[in-house]
Amino acid sequence: MKKILSILLTAAMVMTMLAGCGSSADDAAEAPAQEAPAADESEAPADDAADEAAEAPAEGATITVAAIETAYGSEMWQEVCSAFTAETGINVELITDKNLEDVIGPSMQAGDFPDVIHLATGREKALTETFIKDQNIVDITDVLSMTVPGESAVVGDKIAGGFTETSLTNPYGDGKTYLAPMFYSPCGLFYNAGLFEEKGWSVPTTWDEMWALGDEAKAEGISLFTYPTTGYFDAFFYALMYSVGGADFFDKATNYEEGIWDTPEAQKCFEIVAKLAEYTEPTTPAQANDQDFTKNQQLVLDNKALFMPNGTWIVGEMAEAPRADGFAWGMTALPAVEAGGDGYSYTWFEQAWIPGGAEHQDEAKQFLAFLYSDAACEIFAKAGAIQPVLNIAEKLEGDNQMFYAIYDNGAKAAMGNFAAYDGQVVSVTNREIWFDPVNSLVSGNMTKDQWVEGIKEYNDQMRENLVQ
Amino acid sequence: MKKRSGRNGFIFLCAAPAVILFTVFMVIPTINVFRMSLFKRSAYSTTEDFVGLDNFTRLLKDTNFIRSMQNTILLIVVVTIITFGFALVFAAILTREKIKGQNFFRIIFYIPNILSVVVISAIFSAIYDTNNGTLNSLLSLFKGEAVAVLWKGEDMVMISLIIAMVWQAIGYYMVMYMASMASIPQSLYESTSLDGAGRITQFFQITLPLIWTNIRTTLTFFIISTINMAFLFVKAMTSGGPNGASEVALSYMYKQAYTNSSYGFGMAIGALVFVFSFGLSALVNAVTKREPLEF
């Protein structure tokens, strides 16, 4: 009797274990089913549109699109995917998540890649950068000469000038485009326009005016500057480099050219930042982390600091936050170095790309082309995401109209970023040597010279290990 | 004979699930970490280059890694000593003395342990706030003027982490010590008090030696949990900043493996931390070895 009981118990244990192992296989099979709502939605119109889209080469194929869910929400992606299926007959299995890397990462490590990934650079997990450094991204230069599905226009003619010539889309400087520019947002210095009106201050157009305003504000107990985290300095620095030395200096600097940091232009950049650190609200570095950065943003809403570098998303991000009476958002480009010089506003944009391991690359390219169609742009714009296509400004409303008009009001557009280098040889990121030390400059734990020394040392290593 | 083989079969079947699961989810991934630390690769690389011990030699020259390791060791030492001291004293008071509301204190001390690190970091964000924070308000009450200590600034950030980690850990260890203190027979205390031993003598001569086995176990826990919890606290509270001042070994590993796209190098850090925590635990275990005392 005892023996039978023990056999039964053992059998039960083995069964549970097998069930445990088995369920993972079930899960894998179920996973796509959970995505089914999105897939179903996109399939339904596919049948209707099948006849119209008869000329589509890969009708009935299914591509996987993975898109990061940001402040714009994920609904716009579902709508765009449905519209794409209706137009081309290609089904789309959509994956959206706020932590997209965690969702698609494990399957990619197992060799299963989505066909299109929409994910910007500059995120902590640096998935896009990793693919760039691995040279594991499909060349999409031919997409620029493709016709937008459902339209007669060519993709390259629709995308606004400059967007497909930056190091963000052509990371290897070989004249080929690897990443498609998506949702752009002008970055600049944000301030309380109401406060400026109340005090009778005018927005500075040169750095000298900036310092004068800083002294004036200090007398009233207001700091000139704050920043959410040092990560927000990328847009700031790039625009600063442009305004100090123009596109030529920017290109040399972002490619770590030898001796570039000893040029007068570079010295000017360092000087401005070091001086700005003196004018920065003193609690800023202690709050410049991913948890407390809104406290720094709040400083501007509370009239404790005048300017902060940011992007247009700030309006939505702080929509619920309390604010000083008469508060109104204002945005300005970075001041010019000299009177009459150019003010620059950095154009931040996201990227969509096709990983090297994608199975349906031709269909994926069609999808990328479709993202610039009038239909897609309109769906995106409804959610506040602005595609970098010509004549988009007419579709904007509210605060966005004012923000996106910054380039019409005299500011020049700055685009690009630091050239990719082999992170497996150089163990620091540009953020660590360029932007993070600003915290130490403000708190006085580091001098300007120490900061510049660090930049020189590591930039030399980066130059020797460029990914080309 | 037949009976024995049946018994062995039964033991084998009973142990098999645990052994298989342990191998699949613990042994193989650990070996993989060590293997990948010898390669140059990113997290999603389709190819990998064997580089031998290059990643490790680079690590030893990497000043940022050395700083993160220093921070880790600082946390292990300071958090362990403070938590250990407080937990022992509180446990002794709560088990030996008759205090009103004993259960109340026990629960209050234990609560931080059931909170998630994200909640704790939100609580401490309010405590450490420079302008309206509890801590600065309290200090200004004593000082008579506004105090603006930057608790998460470069100079104070490690102290702030230590305070939060001690606060979180005390209750857990206190309950563990209380459990073993409760099993010490009351008669021992009575007889020593007849011999004239005071409370402090009793604590050092009776309580401590009799819970020694428990203390040894918790010391290993301290090492392992401080290494792990430090990562969570840093991620949630400081993001390793300002300017890397609060980076610890595991957060640096994460940064290298993902943000800097050098997975192999990150795995080398992982391998080193693994060896370090194993070695340190073994060392502490060896140093604290005593003849076990029985009641």
Image: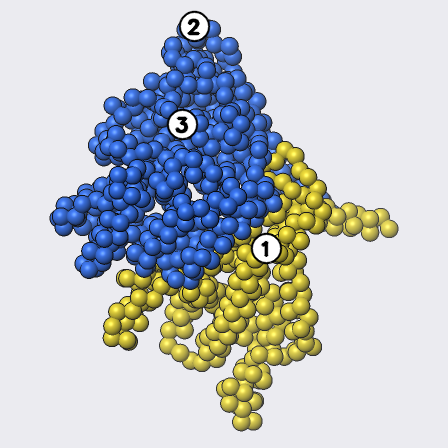
Horizontal arrangement in the rendering, residue A182 relative to residue A7 (left or right)? left
Q: Secondary structure at mark 1?
A: loop
Q: Quadrant of the C terminus of chain A?
A: top right
Task: Measuring from the top left, give residue B218's x and y in whole percent.
Answer: 58, 67
Q: CA distance from mark 1 to mark 2?
A: 62 Å
- Foreground residue among B108 and B243: B243
For the residues labelled 3 and 1, the Cα–Cα distance comes to 37 Å
Figure quadrant of residue A8: top right
In-front residue for pair A356/B134: A356
Q: Is residue B241 visible?
A: no
The kind of residue on which mark 2 rests is: Asp
Which-is-in-front pick, marks 1 and 2?
Answer: 1
Q: Are discs 1 and 2 located on one and the same chain?
A: no
Chain hosting mark 2:
A
Crowd around label 3: few <14 · some 14–19 · many ≥20 (10 Å): many
Q: What's the amino acid at mark 3?
A: Phe
Chain letter for the part of the structure drawn in blue? A
- Disc 2 target residue: A51
Q: Residue A173, image x and y in percent?
A: 51, 30
Residue A372 against residue B241 in the figure, above or below: above
Which of the chains is yellow? B
In the rendered image, which residue does mark 3 sit on? Answer: A163
The coloring applied to the image is: by chain
> Which residue is farthest front?
A264
Q: Residue at x 59, y 75 (%)?
A: B211
At x 30% / y 30%, what residue is drawn? Answer: A384
Q: Which residue is mark 1?
A: B62
Whichever of labels 3 and 2 marks the residue nearer the N terminus, that label is: 2
x and y percent of residue B143 in the render?
28, 75
Q: Is residue A78 left or right of residue A6?
A: left
